[in-house]
Amino acid sequence: MSAAGTAFFQDVDFITAAYIVAFGMFISGLAKLTSPTTAVQGNKIAAVGMGVAVVATLLNPALDGADFALIAVGLAIGTVIGVPAARNVKMTAMPQMVALFNGVGGGAVALIAWAEFRGVGGDLGSELDVGIPLVFAAIVGSISFWGSNIAFGKLQGLISGSPVKIPAGLFVNIGLLAIAIGAGVAILLGSTSEGLFVLILVASAVLGNLAVLPIGGADMPVVISTLNAFTGLSAAAAGIALNNYALIVAGMIVGASGTILTDQMAKAMNRSIGSVLLGGFGGEAPAVEGGTSETGGTVRSTSAADVAILLAYARQVVVVPGYGMAVAQAQHTVREMAKALEKKGIEVKYAIHPVAGRMPGHMNVLLAEADVPYDQLREMDDINPEFGRTDVSLVIGANDVTNPDARMKADSPIYGMPILNVDESKQIIVLKRSMASGFAGIENPLFYNDKTQMLFGDAKASVAEITSELGQL
């Protein structure tokens, strides 16, 4: 490239304009994520925007003398690992993939902060506008990385989903945070000890582990979105320290959206964010044995043929998907069953609880993947008034989000959590493999309701059999 061309592309105004284009693409892509029908396009737009931001950063004259070969190796390693992992991940494993990728982002920010500390010889006290953001990025990035790893382990089954209580855990966590902040203050006051910076990273790492271990599986959607916000804020702080507009804007977008999502998820569970982060709700418990409940209720089993007959004579059917549907990968089969019902003039709707599954929006994505019309997906507040006039509710792998104890039993761990009022339907069919409890580890009296019949087995196979029976009616 000619000297004139190099000067043009490395001009500050050109780089700034490229960043502005990238930011516009970030925002446009995020806006399109609000609908499953445009989400794929939104992801592509945002990805191109990030590509523009990366190229603009590499054009910065401040990078003259940088080891571009090492940068290329890093990009290659990330591409080789990230692309196949993202393409091959199953939808059921998407929550843990999100947790893992989010953690990697936080870890990268913590390492950037450490590298920058070493780059200035540890002298952050003379430049507080750089030092304060770097210390913040190191603390929050390290917490996010290690906390996300624990969330990944719980979701992947590598760590028990039950809350792991730490003796005097709250005081231990406060002490660890105080150590990290204290070491940061010492650095900002003029200390150049690299040991103090390593202490920040280590104390924050232990804090990230101990903060997430006591949180049970049912609260993982809130934890994931919280840690996502942490990663975004740490990236924005690193961007301020490095004077990198792309990191600042992208980090703030992630931080803001993650914070809003965290608030929405907590409200959906009628729990404060503090109670999620400090509580232990959502552990596992042994499955209920036998066919009777603790209160003496009896389970009524049914067959696919009987379910088909019941559905065939309904006017309105509401499908209530849960994580069990995701595990069975039954979304396409459910869509085929719905088509068979619609051919008979039966109205089919889908009741979506905000925290059904293990990640916000999990059910929406699964059903969109199966080409379920978006106007058939009804959020909890919209569908709840309709259960009273619903002939059959078909619950597929959903548990805690349909548990009426949340409304009726004041001493229940989930009391007060908004649920789908499935128990108000005229007839209820529940598809489950067994009588095992959900994430909350408690019994669901819906399964023993006089209007409920249980169809045991793999959800995909059961729905396929129901569809086959419908074809013969």
Image (cartoon, rainbow, N blue to C red):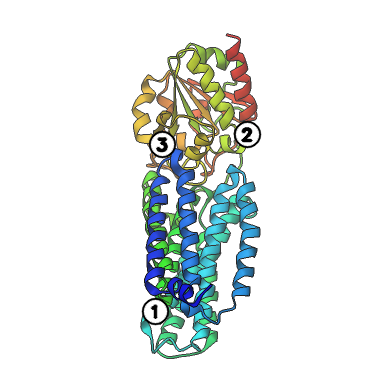
Q: Residue at x 48, y 17 (%)?
A: 342
**Can you give x and y, in whole percent of width and height, for residue 455 in the image?**
59, 24
**Can you give x and y, in whole percent of width and height, for residue 222 in the image?**
45, 52
Residue 386 in view of the camera:
yes
Disc sitting over residue 369 in the figure: none
Mark 3, residues whose alpha carbon is within 10 Å: few (<14), some, or many (≥20)?
many
Disc sitting over residue 132 in the figure: 1
Circle 3 sits on which residue?
419
Q: Residue furthest top?
A: 473
Q: Residue at x 51, y 31 (%)?
A: 371
Q: Amino acid at mark 1?
A: Ile
Compare residues 113 and 404 and report the one nearer the observer. 113
Position of residue 30 in the picture relative to residue 205 (left or right): left
Mark 2, residues whose alpha carbon is within 10 Å: few (<14), some, or many (≥20)?
few
Whole-angstrom CA distance, mark 1 to mark 3, is 43 Å
Q: Amino acid at mark 2?
A: Glu
Position of residue 325 in the picture relative to residue 21 (left or right): right
Q: Residue at x 62, y 26 (%)?
A: 456
**Secondary element at image label 1:** helix
Compare residues 281 and 385 and report the one nearer the observer. 385
Q: Earlier in the sequence, mark 3 or mark 2?
A: 2
Disc sitting over residue 289 in the figure: 2
